[in-house]
Amino acid sequence: MRALLTALATFFVLAAPASAASTTLVVNEVDYDQAGTDTAEFLEIRNDASTPVNLDTYAVRFVNGANNAIYLNADLPNVDLAPGGHYVVCGDQVTVPACNLDIGAATDLIQNGAPDAAAIVQGDTVVDAVSYEGRVPGYTEGPGTAPTDTAAGPPAGPESISRVPEGCDTDDNALDFQRVPATPGAANGGAACGGPPADAAPTVTDTTPDNNANDVALDASVDITFSEDVSVTPTAFSVTCASSGAHDVAVSGGPRTYTLEPDTDFARGERCTVTVSASEVSDADTDDPPDNMGADFRFAFTTVGVEGLRIHDIQGAQHRSPYENQVVSGVPGVVTAASTNGIWVQDASPDADDRTSEGIFLFSPSARPPVGTAVLFSGAVQEFKQATWGPESLSLTEISRPTVTAVEGGSPIAPTVVGEGGRLPPNRIIDNDSTGDVDTNPTFDPQQDGIDFHESLEGMLLQFNDAVATGPSNSFGEVSIVGDNGRFAGVRTPRGGVIVRSDDFNPERFILDDVIGETPSTANVGDKFSSPIVAVGDYSFDNFKYYPLADATATGALQREVTETPSSKELSIASFNVENLAPTDSPAKFAGLADTLINNLKAPDVVAVEEIQDNDGVSGGTASPVTDASVTWNALIAAITAAGGPTYQYRQIDPVDDQDGGAPGGNIRQGFLYRTDRGLAFVDRPGGTSTNATAVVRSRGDAHLTFSPGRIQPSDPAFTTSRKPLAGEFTWKGKTLIVVANHFNSKGGDDPLFGHLQPPTRVTETQRHAQATIVNRFARDIQRADPLANYVVLGDINDFEFSETVQILQGFQMLDLYYLLPPNERYSYVFEGNSQALDHILVSPALLFPLPEYDSVHVNSEFFDQQSDHDPQVARLRPN
């Protein structure tokens, strides 16, 4: 979603560190201002030792000014550098093919001011350094400095300051370094250490058109300039194009610059590659070797494409551009926003069709003019999908590596208001007219279909007024909102969210992301944004995203809920997903869960706990035979006791290693916490294991379990790589109560709401349906054994109260207690700003008289500082 930059310090001053001569790693070559540009910059490290050196404890440092301002410090990776080997650190891997470590600083890797220095450091010790453009204290070796870009006149081409010869290190920058053609990742020329440079192989220093140039005329010639006078054979050059194929060329000029005249014109909008054969180019001097170029040289350009288009033509009234994979030329726009890898532009003269977006993203442009600048751009139209998004994602229409030219007449674009006074988003339907794939659907209806509405805003500058958060801030810098204080949103929760219904997954949600400006890191559901949010529309990771141009802030006063304390006649039973609880979690998490159980849930008599991990927790996928979770359980019980809560006991069954899903090595399972000081007791019937099944039997008129605790059909394929239901028998003041704790198969693997397949395929439902069927049959067995039996089925069902999964589970044997709540209060989880019910408590008919008290206790899912991602559920029952 965003570039990962090596930490770039704002200019700050440090005392000059101690300097030490290196007998191992040296700064072997530093790119120097490629003819006045900031492209292709690099620093090359060489191992001068006779044994390998591991780079893990070293860093590269760039310093500017006599006051030692360190403007870039980048750690090196855990890599062994062989004797005589090179390691190249660069700011743009595309333009430095030999790059080993791209630190993403293409515009400022090498500072352009005097004095300057580059160094290899180990902790606070300078291992090796070179100063140029003057002396930098602590970073200058010897009485002099390396040559500057003006010492020998203007650069002849891509040049660097290099140790000449290779690895030369007399600890005197003036003697060791020469200004020579750049050779990143390759050996430098030269004779004696500290002497004049030896003859270098000829290289290509300039081309017309430039590499990756756009808008090249169809009848253009090609110029190639070398670093020195050369002679060439008749077949030294070849030109091959994507559409027009290979071109014979007439070669003229020389001996430094040669002109190629293709025999026929190029085709419109095609990419052509020019190759210079190294073996057919030799220098004119007699100082050999080297004589020929060191390697073949290639560059490419694109001819002028489709002209006369506007951005809305490129976007089209559809999800994929009608000009996909074509080259467009001279398209007008105004710069509206910028990110680390491109800019957004928008047409200042939109058409009258709201279905066609007026904005587009330019990826890796040739120039990045400031916001408000009028530009013309040319490049290839592509539908971009990042590999990590998955094949189900939509694509993002963008222009790849365009040429961008500033023109007269620019002024800032006014954002399009989304909501009242502007474009109102659909608030119920995501898509209702696709035939399986929105990419091929001939109907594009932003007025009714949310997925089309968001697509019609792709790349545009937008404004959201009176926004309110419908989901908490997450670790990705995202927060979901609706505009206009939710006046046009679907069904709202009493606490400010939007509820999921069977026919409404809330397409009116907009996910803000901190790609450009900061989003609030502490927003809770219902928090309000006091200022309008101006953002640019984009798409990534299965969702439309909106990037605020300025930092956004939200405020609110959402409080965590507290349920009622049960009376002496009420049995309190709860379900609580504790999100991969392991002994490796912080004491603060255990303390937070304990506080929630005691103070918010009022210390229930029985808690079905989901996602307890084994004693060594998640081991990063490393195989571990540990399945015992006694340390985890006891740590949670101890935290409850330490917080002043009652003494709990637990019952559970260890799973077979890595057979129940969840994080590899974690062995999550569900179990029971219970207290015995209010009339509850657990009935232990030993024999239950991870692989055998408990059953229901009738004895003395009551239903009982053969094993307690015991698993329900653990070998059934419905529970492959999923948690197995755990049944336990209790007594409450002498009355039998059977409780089944569940954690059904997750939704991971289902199609996203805003993917190209519509309606989304929910492949995970099949397994949950099978799981629900088995648990419902078990409930039926209990009821057959005793029609008045007290039994509860609860846990993380991973499906909605209106879903087929819950309807199968409920059957005629139970009632999902969510139906005792108003529809807008039926939720325990907030996903991408959607409030939804995943955690359930279902009870037998006998427990419905009198009606239970039910509470989805909102303490986690709506808050940025969560102890778990699920809200616990509590029911207060009166077993008969």
Image (cartoon, rainbow, N blue to C red):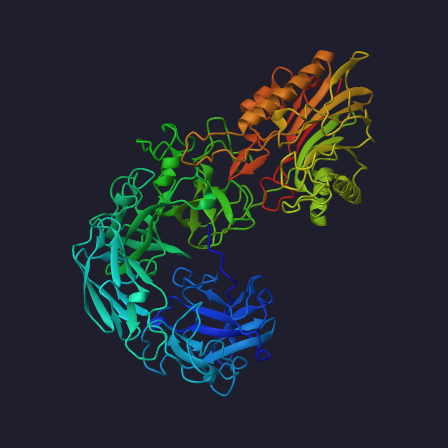
Q: Nearer the viewer, residue 717 or 493?
A: 717
Q: Residue at x 45, y 61 (%)?
A: 104
Q: Is residue 13 above or below residue 486?
A: below
| 321 is higher (above) or lower (below) than 399 | above
Residue 557 placed where, x, y %?
58, 45
Q: Is residue 378 shown to the viewer in this render?
A: yes
- Could you say which is closer to the camera, residue 465 or residue 767? 767
Occupied quadrant, residue 304: bottom left
Residue 552, image x and y in percent? Answer: 48, 52
Q: Is residue 390 left or right of residue 741?
A: left
Q: Is residue 100 left or right of residue 380?
A: right
Q: Is residue 304 visible in this depiction of the protein?
A: no
State which quarter of the image contains the C terminus: top right
| Rendering quarter of residue 739 | top right
Residue 63 versus residue 261 in the image, above or below:
below
Camera-nearest residue between 232 and 779: 232
Q: Residue furthest bottom?
A: 143
Q: How many numbered badges does the structure rendering display?
A: 0
Asked if residue 154 is positioned above or below residue 462 in the image, the reply reads: below
Q: Position of residue 58 (x, y in %)?
A: 58, 68
Describe residue 43's horizontal placement relative to residue 866 as left or right: left
Where does residue 737 sit, x and y in percent of width and height?
Answer: 76, 21
